[in-house]
Amino acid sequence: MEPELVLLSPWIEPYSPDGVALELKRELAPDHPLYGKSVQALAVARDRDDVLFRIGETSPFQNAVVHLTWSHKAEPAPCPNTYPFDSLELWIEWMKADHDDYTYDPSIAS
């Protein structure tokens, strides 16, 4: 069973999940590992152009964080940069570390 997705800053629910999925499809060239795959946007990082996608069909990984370029056209490999995660649980652990980095305040560090 998949864990509940509780997002931590800077990750938020996508305002337009279909819009970011459409932009991903525009940016994928035929040699990209996500080309032709069905995707579902689960979260976006509000401080950068990263999107967490659930990957459908016959992908070797279940989820991926993709750094969109917003060029509205196919990008040469390896763009858009893609960071695969074998499970949502692994991404959640990564998100927790990302959250800690995002909320780190050096003025209170000892």
Image: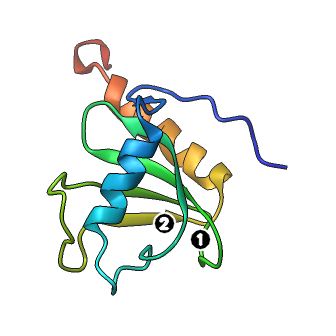
Type of the residue with mark 2: Pro
Q: Is residue 88 above or below residue 42?
A: below
* Location of residue 98 by image quarter: top left
Residue sitting at 18 percent across and 57 percent down? 72
Q: Is residue 101 above or below residue 54?
A: above
* Location of residue 99 by image quarter: top left
Q: Is residue 40 left or right of residue 27?
A: right
* Residue at disc 1, secondary structure: loop
Which residue carries the number 2 mark?
84
Tell me if mark 2 has few (under 14), some (14-19) or many (20+) residues whose alpha carbon lies within 10 angstroms of its own: some
| Res. 80 visible in picture | no
In this rendered view, identify the residue nearer to me: 87 or 55: 55
In this rendered view, identify the residue nearer to me: 56 or 102: 56
Type of the residue with mark 1: Phe
Q: Residue furthest left?
A: 71
Q: Is residue 108 left or right of residue 69?
A: right
Q: Position of residue 85 (x, y in %)?
A: 55, 62
Residue sitting at 35 percent across and 80 percent down? 32
Residue sitting at 41 percent across and 64 percent down? 83
Q: Residue furthest top?
A: 108
Which residue carries the number 1 mark?
61
Q: Residue furthest bottom?
A: 31
**Residues under numbered marks 1 and 2 in contact, where contact means CB atoms less than 8 Å apart:** yes
Tell me if mark 1 has few (under 14), some (14-19) or many (20+) residues whose alpha carbon lies within 10 angstroms of its own: some
Q: Position of residue 16 (x, y in %)?
A: 41, 34
Disc on the earlier residue, 1 or 2: 1
- The mark tally for this picture is 2
Q: Position of residue 35 (x, y in %)?
A: 41, 76
Q: CA distance from mark 1 to mark 2?
A: 6 Å
